[in-house]
Image (cartoon, grey):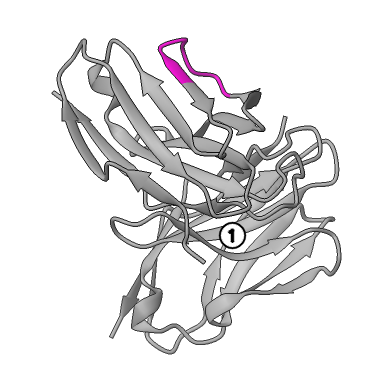
Amino acid sequence: AQSVTQLGSHVSVSEGALVLLRCNYSSSVPPYLFWYVQYPNQGLQLLLKYTSAATLVKGINGFEAEFKKSETSFHLTKPSAHMSDAAEYFCAVSDLSSGDKLTFGTGTRLAVRP
Amino acid sequence: KAGVTQTPRYLIKTRGQQVTLSCSPISGHRSVSWYQQTPGQGLQFLFEYFSETQRNKGNFPGRFSGRQFSNSRSEMNVSTLELGDSALYLCASSRRGGGAQETQYFGPGTRLLVL
């Protein structure tokens, strides 16, 4: 069975600082990995996804993530935080055995200080 | 192209009642999945439908059921509501479904409060 662990339920950064949100996965087969963002009272929006084409994945709004098989990690980064990045971020995993089923991490709430 | 729409957006029910939530996928998408989001349990998979057939099911009691119509619209039903069913219910659609790498597009959710 696959699983995802997000380290840090709350992360606070200053505007302009590096954003680093951590995600480690567990999967018995090659995984597909996703990062979603959720703004208050809204659904989930896909930021980026890893589907084995390239280990460094670039997403929307300046975010990117690197798949590291040796570390079973898929951390999300952004070089410079904006106030508008304040939201909750979810890492998710799926694999061929689970079809469309996404298994989500517990989420990381990002706060951006002015 | 319109996104995933869910109705109603907010709902208040009392214990013991039943509720039906509706989801219209993106045009051309044939797979619809449902998720429950609560502060305590996070995001949990309920079930997935493709071509009117349930293809995958999460670990929820039989009070939770769903169906999909020929136009790919989906409904989920919760019978005999319990306080713990209070949650944000999210619907997601994808083009073909069954492909783990497919992007799922989420709707805004239906927030259910059970009193």
Label 1 resides on the chain identified as A
- Reading the image, the residue beneath label 1 is A35
Residue at image point 27% right, 16% down: B18
Q: Is residue B106 visible?
A: yes
Helix, strand or loop at label 1? It is strand
Q: Is residue A97 above or below residue A39?
A: above
Q: Which residues are magenta?
A: B58-65
Instruction: State the residue in front, A64 or B26.
Output: B26
Check residue A61 for magenta coloring. Answer: no
Dominant secondary-structure state across the stretch colored magenta: loop
Q: Quadrant of the C terminus of chain B?
A: top left
Q: Residue at x 67, y 46 (%)?
A: A93
Up/down of B45 relative to A11, above or below: above
Whole-percent x and y of residue B39? 33, 39
Residue B83 picture quarter: top left
Q: Residue at x 75, y 45 (%)?
A: B100
Q: Is A92 placed left or right of A37 in the picture?
A: right
Expressed as whole percent of the image width and height from the top left, the position of residue B86 reads 27, 29
Quarter location, residue B26: bottom right
How many labels were placed on the picture? 1
Percent x, y for residue A56? Answer: 77, 73
Q: Residue at x 61, y 31 (%)?
A: B49
